Image (tube, rainbow, N blue to C red):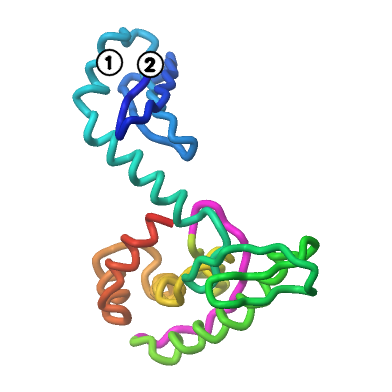
Amino acid sequence: MQLTYNDRDYEIVIEKKRTTKNTYIRVKKDLKIHVTTSIFTPIWSIDKLIKTNYNKICDMIDFQEKKEKNNNGFFYLGKKYVVIYSDNKGIEFDNDKVYINHDFDIDAWYKKQAKDLFKERLDYNYERFTKQIPYPKLRIRKMTSRWGVCNIKTHIITLNLELIKRDTCYLDYVIIHEMSHLIYGDHSRSFWKLVEANMPEYKKYRDEMKEF
């Protein structure tokens, strides 16, 4: 089965499971439309569901394509650069281009930049935070499903290394979000009010980060 959108055909992958009662539709990174359903669901029913939800599926495709565009390439502090491999040592920036040696360890460079910047932004937001909290310990690592994590017991805030690729406004949002957990361990109304008190435009940044 296929779905046609914007003159392009997208493959529909059907996975039937004995333990699944309902039917779920999602578009994955490979832009294939995955349908998970019961082993008893007939093909005509799936076809009808696809047609009924055509516009929603197209929106999911657009969303995944936008995410791919926002993640494919070399990003640093919110700007995308054209990568040019050269014989120079290390890394050099020139307007919208970045010159990198073939043997250059980009991840190590990102970590070095993040170590200083993340600490600087943590200090900046901590000093202006509207509640009194213990000064958090900072850790940085790559994470696939979270931008940040706060350990309430140890007061350790872990930030996703990928934030070094984005504008610092998103880094600030994640820091404020995680510091707020040192007051409220959940995502209650009080928690979000505290986040808003420290970053009134947090909803804008939170929504934009879904596209990364």
Judged from the image, the secondary structure of the residue bearing numbered disc 2 is loop
Is 17 in front, or is 182? 17
Seen in the picture, residue 153 relative to 52 is either above or below; the reply is below
Write down the residue under mark 2.
Answer: 1
Q: Could you tell me which quadrant the C terminus lies in?
A: bottom left
Q: Residue at x 57, y 63 (%)?
A: 82
Provide the residue designation for mark 1: 47
- 114 lies left or right of 171: right
Q: What is the x, y in percent for residue 60? A: 32, 40
Counting from the top left corner in percent of width and height, residue 175 is at 45, 75
Residue at the bottom extreme, as displayed: 127
The kind of residue on which mark 1 rests is Asp
Q: Residue at x 38, y 24 (%)?
A: 35
The answer to whether residue 17 is above or below residue 88 is above
Q: Which residue lies at the image location 39% right of the left edge and 50% below the top edge? A: 66
Q: Which residues are magenta?
A: 131-146
Viewer-side residue, 10 vs 86: 86
Q: Rate crowding at label 2 as few (under 14), some (14 to 19) or many (20 or more) other CA atoms within 10 Å.
A: few
| Chief SS of the magenta region | loop
Q: Note whether 47 is above or below 211 in the view shown.
A: above
Q: How many marks?
A: 2
Q: Secondary structure at mark 1?
A: helix
> Is 138 part of what is drawn in magenta?
yes
